[in-house]
Image: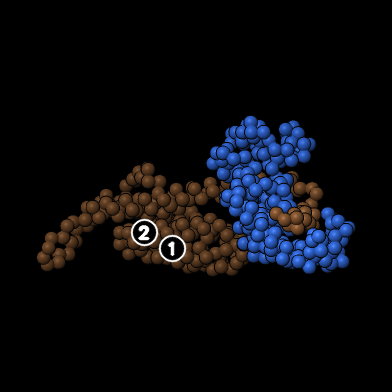
Chain colours: A brown, B blue
């Protein structure tokens, strides 16, 4: 560097010391308190998400497994004139979908019951939208599965989809009005009652350990 | 707590030796909350100062400092010890600051009147208030990475090795960016050339 450049660097060092001068005292205690609180909040959120994700993944796994079994065991249609196969699905495949549906309805009922309780007390729940989005994806999987061959089940799934769509768009900032609207939809369509009655009484209990 | 006080009494500006640092990290990884506070106390001053230098705002500086340490604790298991912990921490800090500045998409406006410049702390009474104002504007106007290198080196005293490690670049890149930053500042402050020209 030239002498002039050296002097300029010295000049910069002198004059730039005041640039965005930090306070003499670092607010270390206040920042530590904030750090600790935020770490606790994030840890709690991650724990909840892991539980919900395990549940969603489990149900999805059951459904995907059911689809795979259905495809593997589907009767081969011989070449020639089209033949309508009226053979009912294997009991095991049907049981897989119904089991997944039963688990899903149980979960949906719990979530909607809590949502209804909060909405009746005027407590808008911003966290409901996140759970609703997860339930929505499972709802759509079921709608696309043989579980929806039953017209009553299909109708229930479609009504649930509407409610969950509205819940998924909720935010805490919107206040209580949208939640009240959803509450009304729940009650007008007797969604909760139909959910509770949706468990197939003819289905024997099936263990799906490993899927959940 | 006693260890925390010891660190505080030392002014928290002393770097830990390699063995002490290794022990501290092991204790943090084992879940020792006092060790977490010790680690924080050793490094928070320099991180906060850097954040404040870059944003000129206490709230933002606190946010960036806090986020730096939150991420550091989350990722400490992945710290392999190839570099000093301070270097690793500052790489997180520079990333948080640069990304944070992009999100904020604003910079503090220099609303301070020229007549008040002489009353601000740290300002030499010999400094021309107009120079101070122009200097601040000139540094503010630097591209973010140049400004970061300039602030770290010429204002806060980081070495090029520390800067390069923090920014994930080479030492030569740090030197080149500093050179360009100084050249831009020289152009911006040309009216004050008499202060350094022979």
Circle 2 chain: A
Q: Which residue is mark 1?
A: A160
Circle 1 chain: A
Q: Nearer the viewer, residue A11 or A49?
A: A11
Q: CA distance from mark 2 to mark 1?
A: 11 Å
Q: Is residue B47 left or right of residue A7?
A: left
Q: Is residue B93 visible?
A: yes
* Mark 2 or mark 1: whose residue is earlier in sequence: 2
Q: Are dots 2 and 1 in contact, CB under 8 Å?
A: no
Q: Nearer the viewer, residue A203 or A174?
A: A174
Q: Which residue is mark 2?
A: A142
Residue under the image location 50 percent in, 56 percent down? A131
Q: Looking at the picture, how far across and down is residue A69, in whole percent? A: 27, 51
**How many numbered markers are drawn?**
2
Residue under the image location 53 percent in, 58 percent down? A128
Figure quadrant of residue A154: bottom left
Q: Is residue B152 left or right of residue B95?
A: right
Residue at the limit of the structure toward the left, as seen here: A80
For disc 1, the neighbor class at 10 Å (few under 14, some 14 to 19, many from 20) is many
Residue under the image location 58 percent in, 44 percent down? B74
Q: Looking at the picture, how far across and down is residue A140, in whole percent? A: 39, 61
Q: Looking at the picture, how far across and down is residue A9, in whole percent? A: 74, 55
Q: Secondary structure at mark 2?
A: helix
Figure quadrant of residue B180: bottom right
Figure quadrant of residue B29: top right
Figure check: B137 above or below B12: below
The disc placed on residue B160 is none
| Placement of the N terminus of chain B among the 4 image quadrants | top right
Q: Secondary structure at mark 1?
A: helix
Q: Looking at the picture, how far across and down is residue B119, in whole percent? A: 87, 60
């Amino acid at each position: 560097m030239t002498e002039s450049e050296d002097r300029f660097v010295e000049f910069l060092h002198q004059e730039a010391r005041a640039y965005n001068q930090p306070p003499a005292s670092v607010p270390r205690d206040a920042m530590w308190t904030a750090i600790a609180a935020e770490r606790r909040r994030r840890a709690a959120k991650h724990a909840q998400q892991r539980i919900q994700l395990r549940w969603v993944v489990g149900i999805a796994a059951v459904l995907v497994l059911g689809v795979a079994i259905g495809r593997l065991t589907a009767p081969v249609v011989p070449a020639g004139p089209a033949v309508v196969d009226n053979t009912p699905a294997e009991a095991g495949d049907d049981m897989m979908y119904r089991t997944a549906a039963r688990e899903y309805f149980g979960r949906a009922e719990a979530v909607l019951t809590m949502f209804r309780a909060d909405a009746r007390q005027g407590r808008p729940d911003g966290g409901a939208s996140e759970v609703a989005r997860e339930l929505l994806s499972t709802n759509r999987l079921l709608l696309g599965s043989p579980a929806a061959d039953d017209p009553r089940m299909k109708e229930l799934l479609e009504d649930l989809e509407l409610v969950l769509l509205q819940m998924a768009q909720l935010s805490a900032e919107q206040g209580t009005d949208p939640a009240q609207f959803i509450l009304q939809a729940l009650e007008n369509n007797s969604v909760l009652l139909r959910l509770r009655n949706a468990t197939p009484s003819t289905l024997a209990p099936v263990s799906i350990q490993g899927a959940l | 707590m006693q260890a925390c006080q010891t660190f505080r009494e030392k002014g928290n500006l002393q770097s830990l030796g390699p063995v002490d640092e290794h022990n501290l990290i092991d204790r943090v990884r084992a879940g020792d909350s006092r060790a977490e506070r010790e680690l924080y106390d050793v490094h928070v001053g320099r991180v906060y100062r850097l954040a404040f230098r870059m944003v000129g705002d206490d709230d933002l500086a606190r946010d960036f400092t806090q986020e730096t340490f939150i991420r550091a604790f989350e990722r400490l298991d992945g710290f392999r010890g190839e570099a000093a912990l301070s270097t690793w921490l500052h790489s997180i800090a520079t990333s948080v600051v640069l990304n944070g500045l992009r999100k904020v998409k604003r910079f503090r406006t220099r609303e301070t009147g020229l007549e008040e410049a002489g009353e601000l702390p740290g300002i030499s009474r010999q400094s021309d208030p107009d120079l101070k104002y122009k200097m601040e504007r000139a540094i503010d106007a630097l591209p973010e990475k140049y400004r970061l290198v300039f602030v770290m080196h010429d204002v806060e005293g980081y070495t090029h090795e520390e800067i390069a490690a923090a920014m994930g670049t080479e030492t030569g890149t740090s030197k080149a960016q500093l050179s360009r930053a100084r050249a831009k500042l020289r152009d911006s402050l040309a009216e004050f050339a008499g202060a350094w020209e022979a």
